[in-house]
């Protein structure tokens, strides 16, 4: 395997993919557009997914009290202190970003697209919030700029999905994926390792399933138990056992080897605000984890797609 295939990584990283696509450094700017979620407002449930924080998994996004433009400019200016040049993906991250009247969606998306040097949109949503009207809008935008849709999937197991109150079954995900791909829209799927009652084989089964689907990207997350989330109740009942750092790194490396070489790895581990985190505490050392993943891949001659050959 030619390790230079993806720069200095043994997998197709988002950074490498975007540099190849646009010819320069691309930054994501995480926004909170003020949307809600049908799994919170009572349409599906009022509890939300059990792991989801009060900020709708947008803990590091902009402040919803400000306009999209103000959020964008503030974050862009902060990034400019470190990086002097590049272009931007406007990332609608918090809550469900296709869950609003179509006129509101157009307004929010267009406000982001008119910002200087924005070359695309990333939109995090649920598979059950993609009406024909929304799909048509996304298709229209995708013809003008690069768009990817992020779907919160977490696990292939409907049993686990029910336990964590995901709010939809596998067939709903499959239809959403089919509908998006029919319109040539890239799909990025979120997975979580460490969910209650799942063992290593259960977690890898999720990756085996996704590796055979027409997805263009994947985000790997470690289950972070945060204060004031519904998941705390399961933890107090002894239903959650935190993964060790070593086991998580092994799962990630095995998963990368299962993926087709054209699937972009958007994330290998997630973040959680230190003041909210109950565990696992080792997850706070993000760069240490990323470096150990790289070292494990190299030491074992692992690379993306190795188990697909």
Image: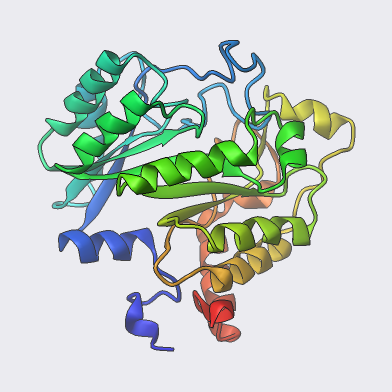
Residue placed at 48% from the left, 54% from the top? 218
Furthest residue in direction top, as rendered: 42
Out of 243 and 212, give the one closest to the viewer. Answer: 212
Camera-side residue of 289 and 234? 234
Residue 11, above or below 221: below
Question: Going by the image, does 218 lie left or right of 42?
Answer: left
Residue 78 relative to residue 6: left or right: left
Q: In the rendered view, would you say 120 is above or below 215?
A: above
Q: Position of residue 236 (x, y in %)?
A: 86, 30
How is the model colour-coded?
rainbow
- Please tell me which residue is depicted at 39% across the width and 31% down the height of the picture: 61
Q: Quadrant of residue 206?
A: bottom right
Residue 24 visible in image? no
The residue depicted at 60 percent of the width and 66 percent of the height is 255
As drawn, the residue found furthest toward the bottom would be: 1
Relative image position of residue 306 (x, y in whole percent):
54, 80
Q: Is residue 75 visible?
A: yes
Which residue is painted at 75% across and 56% down in the image? 202
């Amino acid at each position: 395997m030619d390790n230079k295939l993806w720069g200095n990584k043994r997998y197709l990283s988002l950074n490498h993919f975007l540099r190849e696509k646009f010819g320069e450094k691309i930054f994501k700017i995480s926004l909170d557009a003020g949307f809600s979620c049908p799994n919170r407002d009572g349409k599906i449930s009022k509890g939300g997914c059990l792991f989801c924080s009060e900020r709708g998994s947008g803990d590091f996004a902009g402040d919803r009290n400000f306009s999209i433009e103000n959020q964008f400019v503030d974050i862009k200016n902060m990034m400019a202190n470190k990086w002097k040049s590049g272009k931007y993906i406007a990332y609608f991250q918090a809550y469900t970003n296709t869950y609003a009247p179509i006129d509101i969606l157009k307004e929010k998306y267009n406000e982001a697209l008119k910002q200087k040097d924005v070359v695309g949109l990333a939109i995090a949503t649920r598979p059950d919030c993609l009406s024909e009207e929304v799909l048509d809008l996304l298709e229209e935008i995708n013809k003008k700029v690069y768009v990817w849709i992020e779907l919160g999937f977490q696990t292939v197991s409907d049993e686990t999905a029910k336990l964590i109150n995901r709010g939809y079954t596998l067939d709903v995900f499959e239809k959403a994926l089919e509908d998006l791909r029919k319109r040539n829209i890239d799909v990025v799927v979120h997975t979580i390792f460490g969910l209650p009652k799942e063992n290593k084989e259960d977690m890898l089964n999720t990756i085996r399933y996704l590796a055979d689907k027409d997805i263009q990207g994947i985000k790997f997350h470690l289950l972070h138990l945060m204060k004031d989330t519904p998941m705390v109740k399961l933890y107090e009942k002894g239903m959650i056992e935190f993964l060790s750092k070593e086991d998580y790194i092994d799962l990630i490396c095995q998963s990368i080897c299962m993926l087709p070489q054209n699937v972009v790895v958007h994330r290998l581990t997630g973040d959680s605000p230190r003041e909210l985190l109950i565990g696992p505490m080792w997850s706070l050392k993000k760069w240490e984890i990323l470096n150990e993943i790289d070292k494990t891949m190299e030491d074992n001659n692992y690379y993306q797609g190795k188990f697909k050959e």
